[in-house]
Image (spheres, rainbow, N blue to C red):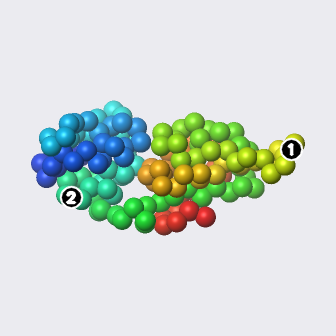
Amino acid sequence: MSYFITEKCIGCTLCKKLCPVGAVEGTLKERHRINEKRCVECGVCGRACGQGAILDQAGNQAEQVPKSKWKKPVILREKCSACSMCVWNCTKDALKIADPSYRGDISVFAELAAPERCVGCGICESACPLHAIYMKAGEAE
C-alpha cells in the first residue's frame, strides 16, 4: 500500500516536486494524488508536507520532518566499487563518482556531491549491489 494524500492537501506541489519517482500527480491549488503503481513508499512526500495531508502505509498521518533532519546516504568507501548504480538511480542528481586523486587512481567511490538535492528517499541504498550505502538521519558524513 502506498502513501495517500487526504483532503487537507492545498495543492502547493511541494510533494510533487520532491517525489523521486514522479508518483505524485496534480496541479497547483488542487488536491494531489499518489499513483500507487509508481510509489516506492520512501516517505518524502509525508516528511515535506506542512499541511499534514499525507497518510503513510498504515493509514497514520505522516510526520513532517525538517529538511536538516532528513536521512542522507553514507557511502562506505572501502566497500564501494564505483559501479555507478546509485548514481544512475538517483533521480535528483545528488550522487556522483568521485574524481581520482591522481592519474591512474582506481580507488574511486561514490559520493554525495550535492547534499542539498538529496531528498532522503533511500533509492541509492536499495540500488547498491554491494550494500556500501546506508541512510543516516541528519548531515551526511
Using the image as rendered, state which of residue 115 and residue 32 is in the foreground: 115
Q: Is residue 87 left or right of residue 27?
A: right
CA separation in Å, label 1 and label 2: 51 Å
Q: Is residue 31 left or right of residue 62?
A: left
Q: Residue at x 22, y 36 (%)?
A: 26
Find disc 1 in the rendering and name its residue: 103
Image height of 19 relative to 118, above or below? above
* Label 1 element class: loop
Q: Is residue 65 left or right of residue 105?
A: left
Instruction: Indicate the position of residue 91 as horizontal and vertical percent values.
Output: 48, 39
Q: Residue at x 39, y 61 (%)?
A: 67
Instruction: Indicate the position of residue 14 as horizontal and vertical percent values.
Output: 29, 48
Using the image as rendered, state which of residue 77 and residue 112 is in the foreground: 112
In terms of sequence position, does the residue under pointer 1 or pointer 2 come before the other?
2
For the C terminus, the image quarter is: bottom right
Q: Circle 1: is it few (<14), some (14-19), or many (20+) Cα within 10 Å?
A: few
Would you say residue 31 is visible in this rendering? Answer: no
Q: Residue at x 40, y 38 (%)?
A: 21
* Label 2 element class: loop
Q: Nearer the viewer, mark 1 or mark 2?
A: 1
The kind of residue tagged 2 is Gly
For the N terminus, the image quarter is: top left
Q: Residue furthest top?
A: 37
Image height of 116 relative to 123, above or below? below
The kind of residue tagged 1 is Arg
Find disc 2 in the rendering and name its residue: 52
Q: Which mark is residue 125?
A: none
